[in-house]
C-alpha cells in the first residue's frame, strides 16, 4: 500500500466539515478519557495485577497508560491549530490520524489479558496459559510495524514499504480475529462468567475494527472522497470516527465487566440488609 499523504491530503485545503469533525473528536475523546481514567484508577486500586508495589502514583500512571484516541486527538489538534495549515502540518495531521489505529488494537490485547485475570486480584493469577499470554502480547508488534511501514512508505513515496505494511496489517488482523474468536470459545471452560462476558464484548469490536481498517486502506487506494483531509464528511464520520468510538466504548465496557469496581460494595450492602431484615 502506498500512502499518498503528501500527494492527496495536501493538494486541497481542509474543509469546514473536517474542522467540525476535529472539534467533535477532541470533545468526545476527552469525555471518554475522563470516564476511563476514573474507572481504571479504581480498578488498579482494587485489583493491581502488577509485580511492583502499589502506590497512588503508579495507579495514576497505569490508568493513563495506552489511552486510546490520544494520537487521533493530536491529529485533530493539528488541524485546528491554523486556519491555513501548511503542507507539513496537514501531512503530520494525516499521519497521526492513520497511526491512531494502532492503539485500538493494542487495547484489544490489554483487555483480553485482563479477561484472563477476571475474578482475581494481585500479580499473576491469569487463567490464560503462558502461550496464550504470549500470543496476546505478540500481535502488538506487527500491528505497529505495519502502520509505520504504510505511513513511512507514503511519506517517502516508496511503494514497496507501503505494500509491505498493507500485507502485514491484513495478515495480523486476521490473526487477531482468529485468536480472539478461539479464546471466546475457550473462555467457557476456563474463565468465570464475568470473564466470558468481557471476552464476548471484545469479539463485538471486531466488525467495527474491520471497517476502520478498510477505511485506512481506502484513504489511499480509494477515490478522492476518502481523502482524510478534504474527503466526504459522511465517510470520515461513518467509517472513521464512529467506528473508533464504538470500539473504545465496547473495550471500556469489557474491562469494566472483567474487573467490576462495585462488586464488593454491593455484596457488603446485601449482607448488611440480610442481617437487618427480620427473621421469617
Image: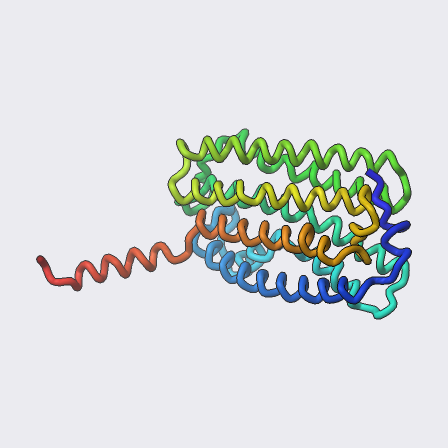
Please state, as top left, top right, bottom left or bottom right, where the N terminus lies in the image.
Answer: top right
User: Outermost residue toward the left?
Assistant: 280
Horizontal side of 56 relative to 71 (left or right) equals: left
Q: Is residue 128 above or below residue 235?
A: above
Q: Which residue is drawn at 46% across and 32% down?
A: 185
Q: Is residue 71 above or below residue 216?
A: below
Residue 58, image x and y in percent? 55, 56
Q: Residue at x 64, y 33 (%)?
A: 174
Q: Quadrant of residue 270?
A: bottom left
Horizontal side of 174 relative to 3 (left or right) equals: left
Q: In this view, does 198 lie above or below 65?
A: above
Q: Nearer the viewer, residue 122 or 249?
A: 249
Please state, as top left, top right, bottom left or bottom right, where the C terminus lies in the image.
Answer: bottom left
Label count reads 0
Residue 39, image x and y in percent? 49, 59
State how the image is colored.
rainbow
Horizontal side of 216 relative to 135 (left or right) equals: right
Q: Nearer the viewer, residue 106 or 127?
A: 106
Q: Which residue is drawn at 32% across and 58% down?
A: 266
Q: Residue at x 33, y 59 (%)?
A: 265
Residue 14, image x and y in percent? 83, 62
User: Outermost residue toward the bottom?
Assistant: 83
Q: Which of 37 and 207 is in front in this view?
A: 207
Residue 167, image x and y in percent? 75, 33
Amino acid at each position: 500500500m502506498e500512502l499518498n499523504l503528501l500527494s492527496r491530503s495536501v493538494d486541497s485545503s481542509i474543509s469546514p466539515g473536517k474542522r467540525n469533525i476535529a472539534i467533535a473528536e477532541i470533545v468526545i475523546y476527552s469525555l471518554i478519557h475522563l470516564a476511563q481514567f476514573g474507572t481504571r484508577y479504581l480498578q488498579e486500586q482494587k485489583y493491581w495485577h502488577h509485580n511492583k508495589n502499589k502506590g497512588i502514583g503508579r495507579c495514576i500512571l497505569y490508568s493513563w497508560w495506552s489511552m486510546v484516541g490520544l494520537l487521533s486527538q493530536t491529529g485533530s489538534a493539528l488541524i485546528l491549530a491554523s486556519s491555513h495549515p501548511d503542507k507539513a502540518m496537514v501531512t503530520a495531521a494525516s499521519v497521526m490520524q492513520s497511526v491512531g489505529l494502532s492503539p485500538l488494537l493494542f487495547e484489544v490485547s490489554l483487555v483480553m489479558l485482563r479477561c484472563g485475570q477476571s475474578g482475581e486480584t494481585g500479580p499473576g493469577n491469569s487463567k490464560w496459559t503462558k502461550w496464550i499470554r504470549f500470543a496476546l502480547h505478540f500481535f502488538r508488534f506487527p500491528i505497529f510495524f505495519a502502520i509505520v511501514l504504510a505511513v513511512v512508505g507514503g511519506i517517502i513515496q516508496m511503494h514497496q514499504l507501503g505494500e509491505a505494511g498493507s500485507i502485514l496489517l491484513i495478515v495480523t488482523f486476521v490473526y487477531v480475529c482468529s485468536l480472539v474468536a478461539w479464546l471466546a470459545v475457550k473462555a467457557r471452560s476456563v474463565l468465570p462468567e464475568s470473564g466470558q462476558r468481557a471476552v464476548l464484548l471484545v469479539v463485538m469490536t471486531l466488525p467495527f475494527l474491520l471497517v476502520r481498517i478498510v477505511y485506512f486502506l481506502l484513504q489511499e487506494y480509494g477515490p478522492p472522497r476518502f481523502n482524510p483531509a478534504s474527503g466526504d464528511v459522511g465517510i470520515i464520520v461513518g467509517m472513521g470516527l464512529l467506528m473508533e468510538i464504538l470500539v473504545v466504548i465496547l473495550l471500556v465496557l469489557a474491562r469494566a465487566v472483567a474487573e467490576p469496581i462495585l462488586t464488593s460494595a454491593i455484596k457488603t450492602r446485601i449482607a448488611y440488609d440480610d442481617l437487618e431484615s427480620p427473621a421469617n
